[in-house]
Amino acid sequence: MKLIFFGCGTSTGVPVIGCHCEVCSSTDPRDKRTRSSVLIRTSDKNILIDTSTDLRTQSLANKIERIDAVLFTHPHADHIHGIDDLRAFNLAQGGAAIPCYGEENTIERIKVMFDYIFREDGKDGWKPNLKTTVIDSPFTIFGIEIIPIRIFHGTASIFGYRIGSVAYITDCSSIPEESFKLLEGTEILILGALRYKPHPTHFSIQQAIDTSNIIKPKRTILTHLSHSLAYNRDNELLPPNVELAYDGLTVEL
């Protein structure tokens, strides 16, 4: 099993439109960040976490030709607006519905924001074939246990996910005590860390490091990165077991 970082950028992506800062002007490919998403690959299944705005580009870049299931963290635009690209995977997979999982508010918001996908009035042509399931506790797909982790994104209650020894926690500003218990024993921790400066709805770099020190994984990878972070410069400033993600980074699980 392996995990591929499809994207590790914040909602604007990096470079940011109209910005000419050091990072947005960088020629280092690790400073080119599409919107945050990861793919869990087993020997025969691909489980996607979030359909980012850049899903098509990410799939082509990583030569991914099938998606067997999708886990949604929350319904913000940068995490769901690539959902229409799932129709290409439907076609490649013979038309079978792709199962999609998320907490109740997320699934309901998706159904409202992309109502054309779920209408059955015959007024729309080629559209994704999706089967949505509301989840609020551990469940199993393809023999793999998925544990939803309740976290807070500002005042919004959303999900991270634990799959085996890896946990994916993005768009997070605080973690309740009961969720810390679910993260015990995590070996690879993926945490959102927007920038150095504090933010009301996202961990800062220091807050992410502090959280990592509580959970004590073997390896912490920071994602959902803004254009204030230069990979070559800032990665060297992190503790030995903490690193910045970059698009295409692959981690063996």
Image: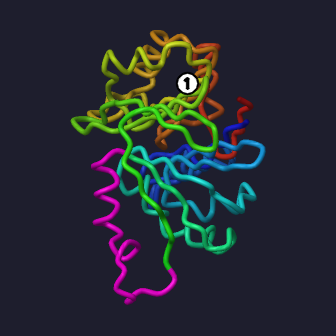
| Nearest to the observer: residue 101 or residue 79 | 101
Which residue is pictured at 48% across the width and 34% down the height? Answer: 161
Does the stretch in magenta take in 248? no
Depicted 161 relative to depicted 73: above or below:
above
Depicted 72 relative to depicted 175: above or below:
below
| Nearest to the observer: residue 249 or residue 238 | 249
Residue 24, how many percent across, how many down? 54, 50
* Residue stretch rendered in magenta on the structure: 103-126
Residue 103, how many percent across, how many down? 34, 44
| Nearest to the observer: residue 219 or residue 137 | 137
Q: For numbered disc 1, what is the local secondary structure?
A: strand
| Total residue callouts | 1
Residue situated furthest right in the rendering: 43
Q: State left or right for residue 128 relative to residue 92.
A: left
Work out which quarter of the rendered image holds the C terminus and state it: top right
Q: Which residue is mark 1?
A: 189
Residue 232, how many percent across, how many down? 66, 32
Depicted 219 relative to depicted 126: above or below:
above
Tell me the kind of residue under disc 1.
Leu
Answer yes or no: is residue 234 visible: no
In which quadrant of the rendered view does residue 89 lie?
bottom right
Residue situated furthest bottom in the rendering: 123
